[in-house]
Image (cartoon, rainbow, N blue to C red):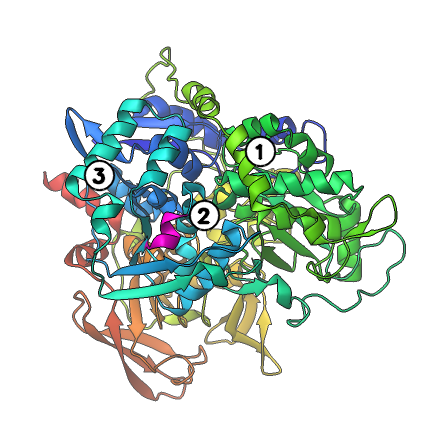
Amino acid sequence: MVETQLIVDHSLAVEHAGFEPDAFEKNRAIEERRNEDRFHFIEWCKTAFKNVSVIPAGNGIMHQINLEKMSPVIQNQQGVAFPDTCVGTDSHTPHVDALGVIAIGVGGLEAETVMLGRPSMMRLPDIVGVKLVGKRQEGITATDIVLALTEFLRKERVVSSYLEFFGEGARALTIGDRATISNMTPEYGATAAMFYIDEQTINYLKLTGREPEQVALVETYAKTVGLWADDLENAHYERVLEFDLSSVTRNMAGPSNPHRRLPTSELAERGIALAQAPADSEGSMPDGAVIIAAITSCTNTSNPRNVVAAGLVAKKANQLGLVRKPWVKTSFAPGSKVAKLYLEEAGLLSELQQLGFGIVAYACTTCNGMSGALDPVIEQEIIERDLYATAVLSGNRNFDGRIHPHAKQAFLASPPLVVAYAIAGTMRFDIECDALGTDANGKPVYLNDLWPTDAEIDEVVGKSVKPEQFQRIYVEMFQQDANSSLSEPLYDWRPMSTYIRRPPYWEGALAGERTLKGMRPLAVLGDNITTDHLSPSNAIMPSSAAGEYLAKMGLEPVDFNSYATHRGDHLTAQRATFANPKLLNEMVKENGEVVQGSLARIEPEGKVTRMWEAIETYMERKQPLIIVAGADYGQGSSRDWAAKGVRLAGVEAIAAEGFERIHRTNLVGMGVLPLEFKPGVNRNTLELDGTELYDVVGEIKPGADLALVVTRANGEKLDVAVTCRLDTEDEVKVYQAGGVLQRFAQDFLAQ
C-alpha cells in the first residue's frame, strides 16, 4: 500500500495580525469555526482508510514537516533499503529534493489515482545539470539566490525538466539554502530540483533529530550504491547550465510573477521607488503603501538563516527606535513550530513581536492568499483614494490578485527585507539609499545599519538551533491516538455544506461524452496564464459569483473564507472559474483595449457579461467550449480546480502555445484535450477574435498531429495544425474514459 500523509496547512487566514495579543489562538479559533465541515471530513478520513496519517491544522506546512521529519531519505522496509520518493498534491513538493529525494508535485487528480493503486505515468524527463560556481557575497540570503536562479532558469526554458545542482557552489550551501532553491521548482517550471547526498545532508539529519541508525543508513547506502556526491563528480549531462553565485545581489521579485527579478539597487531606475515620495497629510497612507508585510512560506521559514536574519534586523531596529508604519499589517507564520523554539532560545522572538511580527499561525497564510481582512478604516481609505497599495512577503508567488484584493501589486523578498519594508511603509521607497528613520540622536538609519553580517547569523544559528527542539515538536505531533474508533466505511454527506459536497464527476457529459465539434471560445488569453487566473485561491468577495451564492446559502461575509477552502464543494468552486479580477480575456475590449476583470463575451450575440453568467448560459445551451491561450498556460499552483472548473463549464479542449506540466496533467485527468500550436503559430497570427467555431479532426494518439478547424463568422474555414498533448498511451486511455476517476472505475469493474 502507498503510505499517505494528509497535512492541513492551507486553511488559516490571518484575520488577526502579528501585533495583536493572542493572534495565534484567535486565528486558529476562526479557522476551526469556518472549516468545521472540512475538518469533520478529515476526522473521518483518519480511521476510514488504512495507511493514512493525518496531521491536523495548526502544526505547520507540509513541505517543511516533510523536510524536517517525514522524509527518511533512504527507506528501510522489512530489511530492504531503497531511496525515498514522494508525490505531493502541492507544486512545492520538490522542497525535499534538497535532501537528495526525488519528490515531485502532481495534481490532486493524479495523486488520487496513486493512492488508489494506479501508477503515476510520465515521460522520461530531460535531466539538466546546473553547475553552481563561485561563492555568495556577504549579506546575500538564500532568497536573493533563488530569485536570481528563478529568472535565469525561466529564460533557459527548463519546463518539465529534472534539474541536478552540483559544483563547489552547491556543496557549500546548507540544506536550508538548498531547500529554498528546490522549493521554488514550479516557479522556474521544472519538475524536480535535486541536490546530491553529501556531508550537508548528514549534518542536517543530525540537526533535525533523526535517529542515529537512520542517519547511518543514509550515509552507508548513498556511499555503497553510488549516490554520494563524491561518486557523482563525473556525472555526464547532455545539457549543463552554469550559474555564478558571486553574481547575486540583493533581490526582490515583482510587481508580479516570481521570475520577474527586481534588484533592490534598481528600484528607482525601474520606477518602483520615487526620488521623493509626495507628502501626505499626517496619518494618511502614502502612494505605494505597503499594507501587508508577511514573513511566511516554507520557501523561507524552513531556512533558519533567513528567519534568524529577520530577527536580527528587528533587534537592531528596536535598539535604534524604529517602528513599523501603522497601516502595515504584519505577520509571522513559520512552516514549523521549531522556529518558535530556536528564536526564543536566541532571544529574537520578542524582538520580532515588538515590531509587529508575532506568530499568527503555523500555516501557509499570506503566501496562499490567506492574508485576511484589513482594518476597515485602512480599507476604506484605499478604496476612497484609489490608492496604489502593495504587499511584501517572503513567499513563493506574487501573481496578480493572489495576495489580497486591495494589494494592487505584490513583491517577494527575503524575511529580513520584509521587516525593513514594514518600517519603510511604502514601495515608493529606495530601500538601499533612503533613510528608514532616525535614531535617538537624530542620525539617519539606513538598511545597512540594520543588516546582520553572515558571521552574526551563523553564530546565532550555531548556538540556538538544536536537535532536541525538533524532537520535542515532532515526537508529540506524530503520536497516534490509540483510542480512535473506526469510522463508518461510507461518508455521511452533509446536504447543506458549502465545503464538502458529493461531486458530480460521474454524471452526464463528465462521464466521457465529448464532441470536439462546434466549440465556442469561453476565453482568448495571452501568455503566462496561471492557475490563479483559472481558479483563484484567495478571499471570496461579497460581490463575486461565489460570494452571492454563499450569501444565499446563509453565510455571513465574514465567514465566506477563501476559494481554496471551499473547493470540496463544486457549487462554490465552479463559481471561481476565471474569477480573478486581474484576468485579461482578449474577447472583451473597449476602444480597442482589453478590459481587465472576470468577464466574458457570449456568442453569437456578442453580449459582454461576468464570466459566471456566460458559463451558466453556455451550460444551459449545452454548448461545448474551447479556450485559446498563449505560452506557458497553467503556471503556478497544482490546483486541480483549474481543470475541474473549466470541465464543469463545458470546456472540451484547450489550444495553447505551451503548457506547464502539472496543469496539463490535470486537464487530462478531467478529460480535457490539451492542444499545442506549432511554433510560430498563435492566436495573433491566426487573427482569432472569439467569434469562431472550432472542431478537432484526426485520430487522437500520443503526440499526434491533429487539425483544429476554425470556422470564422463569415463562413471562412481555416485548418490549423496542432499537436495532441496527450503524451503517453496511458493518458490517451484516461482521456478516452473521461478522466482519471472514470478510468479507475473501468479498471476496478474489469477486475
Residue type at the position of mark 2: Thr
Residue 180: image tag? 2
Q: Nearer the viewer, mark 2 or mark 1?
A: 2
Report how far apart the C-alphas of labels 1 and 3 lie in the structure: 37 Å
Residue type at the position of mark 3: Ala
Location of mark 3 (residue): 222
Residue 157: image tag? none
Q: Nearer the viewer, mark 1 or mark 3?
A: 3
Location of mark 1 (residue): 361
Q: Nearer the viewer, mark 2 or mark 3?
A: 3
Of marks 2 and 1, which one's residue comes earlier in the chain? 2
Up-down relation of residue 652 to residue 393 (above or below): below
- Look at 49% across and 63% down and name the residue there: 247
Where residue 19 appears, as percent x and y from the top left, is 72, 35
Judging from the image, what secondary structure is the residue with disc 1 in?
Answer: loop
Instruction: Please identify the quarter of the rendering in which residue 657 is found.
Output: bottom left
Residue type at the position of mark 1: Ala
Specify the segment rendered in magenta: 166-172
Q: Residues within 10 Å of mark 3 (few under 14, many from 20)?
A: many
Report how far apart the C-alphas of labels 2 and 1 lie in the structure: 20 Å
Report how far apart the C-alphas of labels 2 and 3 lie in the structure: 23 Å
- Look at 63% across and 42% down and name the residue there: 372
Depth order, front residue of 239/568: 239
Of marks 2 and 3, which one's residue comes earlier in the chain? 2
Depth order, front residue of 151/27: 151
Q: Is residue 307 magenta?
A: no
Where residue 722 appears, as percent x and y from the top left, is 27, 76
